[in-house]
Amino acid sequence: MLVAPSVLSADFGNLQRDVEEICNAGCNLVHIDVMDGHFVPNLTIGPVVVSAIAACATKPLDIHLMVENNTFFVELFAPLKPQYISFHIEEEKHPHRLIQKIRSLGIKPAIVLNPHTPPESVEYLLKNLDMILLMSVNPGFGGQSFIDSVIPKAKRLSEMRNRLNPKCLIEVDGGVNDQNIHALKEAGVDIVVAGSYVFKHENRAKAIKSLQI
């Protein structure tokens, strides 16, 4: 299991310290939540702050767009060369076109599904994707409780992925901890995003290690 701590839960007064700490502690990716105050009721960080994160991170960036006007934000963050850029299927009218655009920029494209969105909504896009992110909380804020229905949803998606595009990774974001990590692993999940669990743990290296099963 790969672990992508979400910097949304970091101490923004000591952001460089926290990013360097999770990288040194053995995380696999650094997860960046970009929110515009429209698609979700929260406003987070722009390319200036993410550029500062990229400068001190020794692990690849995983940028999760929770925004309207996805194309604008893709173009805004593409120069930072993250490994992944993911966008919500619920917001995008032309997902296939945007997938092609992200890939043309040398970035791996990913699609995000909200808790209520069925895996079948990406069936005809799956062969073009490098990752699918399943939200296990309603997007917008950190520290929420895990929605258990993501487990059977991940299993359904994993079966579809294995049939159509075995190289596509499955990521889960929201309420992940050492209590649900084994069920996620058994469901076929490859990457977990963990914010509060990692950053609020007294030993962040231990927290990351407990998820890398």
Image: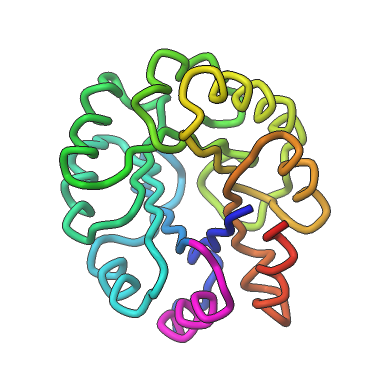
Q: Farthest residue toward the right? A: 179
Q: Position of residue 119 (x, y in %)?
A: 56, 20
Task: Give the answer, above or below, for where 89 lies relative to 75.
Answer: above
Q: Nearer the viewer, residue 77 or 208?
A: 208
Magenta segment includes 19 = yes
Task: Give the answer, above or below, for where 53 lies relative to 44.
Answer: below
Q: In which quarter of the image is residue 72?
A: top left
Horizontally, residue 107 falls left or right of residue 40, namely left
**Residue at the (57%, 49%) spot, across then down:** 191
**Residue at the (72%, 34%) spot, across then down:** 187
Q: Position of residue 189 (x, y in %)?
A: 63, 40
Magenta stretch, main secondary structure, is helix
Bounds of the magenta segment: 14-28
**Residue at the (51%, 29%) spot, across then down:** 166
Horizontally, residue 204 falls left or right of residue 166, namely right
Task: Give the answer, above or below, for where 4 lies relative to 21.
Answer: above
Magenta segment includes 170 = no
Q: Where is residue 100 in the image (x, y as percent from the top left)?
A: 21, 30
**Residue at the (48%, 66%) spot, across then down:** 7
Q: How many marks?
A: 0
Q: In which quarter of the image is residue 12?
A: bottom left
Task: Give the answer, above or below, for where 109 lies relative to 83.
Answer: above
Viewport quadrant of the C terminus: bottom right
